[in-house]
Amino acid sequence: MSEKIARYLTPAKFQWLLEDRGIYFSQLSQQSDKADGTNDANLIVDLLFNYAEKKSKGDLNVDSISKNELATSLASMNKYERDIICISSWYLGDCESEYMWNNYAKDIKTGEVGVCIISSTSKIRYSIPDDLSAFVELDKIDYNSSKKAISIGRNYYYKDDAFADECEFRLAFSLMQYSLVTGFEHPLVPKVTIGSNLKPSSEEFLKDYVKSPDTFLSQELVKQKGDIGFILKLELEDIISEIRLPPNCSEEHQKYFQKLIDESNYNFKLTHSHLDAL
């Protein structure tokens, strides 16, 4: 079932969206929630060893050093994963959120408020090209601090209870998978050695993941932006159903947003905030 999603943008981020002509993904480690995607390595190790000890009926011989080493390794893996997973966050819900307008669309320096782009889970899912679908996950965030603490693997789909008002629907792009399969070079991803040669993964390996390897080799679908972000070249016309103005938007600001759209050669529809009617 398709559900309505929205992304609240400051004026600057809206301008960048139009200029980039794609969706921006930033590293998990660079989010405002500094604990986003983290887990509790010590708690995980304690649970694992307690379970193993019960299964061994008390015969398990474990010293504190081995537990500490494992916890350190898990923490290191988690830190690395937060650098190679990049996300795009959307608000899931039919109604506009005053909380989201105030916390995500307002420029903290100028106080000016941007726009809210409206889409749906099906629109954004179908906008992802077949050649990228193997590297992009889409799912709702589970706001559960307890599960987040012990999650391994897809822990970037858990957040602390305190963030529940964000009602997030998240797109997660795996830089590691994309780079290893396509040969896309990035300092965070090791190069693949095949025999004595250093080169991207083989064509046969590519065929297991994508329908048209040549599209990947041109690497036109993913562009790095700055040091911590990537633009996925998704068709904005296929994603955005309307662009909603902020509550109590002045005529001057409406003209400004319309000018940005016109200069970008898009035909997006500007609509007034539903909160104006309240």
Image (spheres, rainbow, N blue to C red):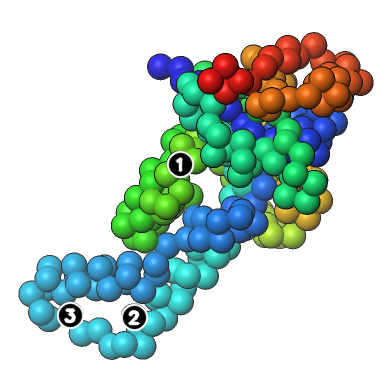
Q: Which mark is residue 165?
A: 1
Q: Position of residue 7 (x, y in %)?
A: 62, 31
Q: In this rendering, is residue 157 above or below 272?
A: below
Vertical arrangement, residue 22 with respect to residue 255, above or below? below
**SS type, badge 3:** loop
Which percent across, then down, holds residue 107? 74, 44
Q: CA distance from mark 3 to mark 1?
A: 44 Å
> In x, y percent, where is residue 214?
74, 29
Judge the density around disc 3: few (<14), some (14-19), many (≥20) Cα neighbours within 10 Å. Answer: few
Quadrant of the frame with the N terminus = top left
Q: Residues within 10 Å of mark 1 (few under 14, many from 20)?
A: few
Q: Earlier in the sequence, mark 3 or mark 1?
A: 3
* Kind of residue indicated by mark 2: Lys
Q: Name the foreground residue: 233 vs 110.
A: 110
Q: Which mark is residue 208?
A: none
For label 3, the residue is: 60
* Residue at x-position 54% and y-position 26%: 96
Would residue 182 be found to the left or right of residue 55 on screen?
A: right
Asked whether residue 76 appears in the rendered view, the answer is yes
Q: Secondary structure at mark 2?
A: helix
Provide the residue designation for mark 2.
67
Left or right relative to 163: residue 50: left
Please identify the quarter of the rendering in which residue 256 is found: top right
Q: Nearer the viewer, residue 37 or 258?
A: 258
**Counting other residues with Cα less than 10 Å from the Cα at mark 2, is it few (<14), some (14-19), or many (20 or more)?**
some
Q: Is residue 56 above or below residue 147?
A: below
Q: Residue furthest right?
A: 263
Residue 146 falls in image quadrant? bottom left
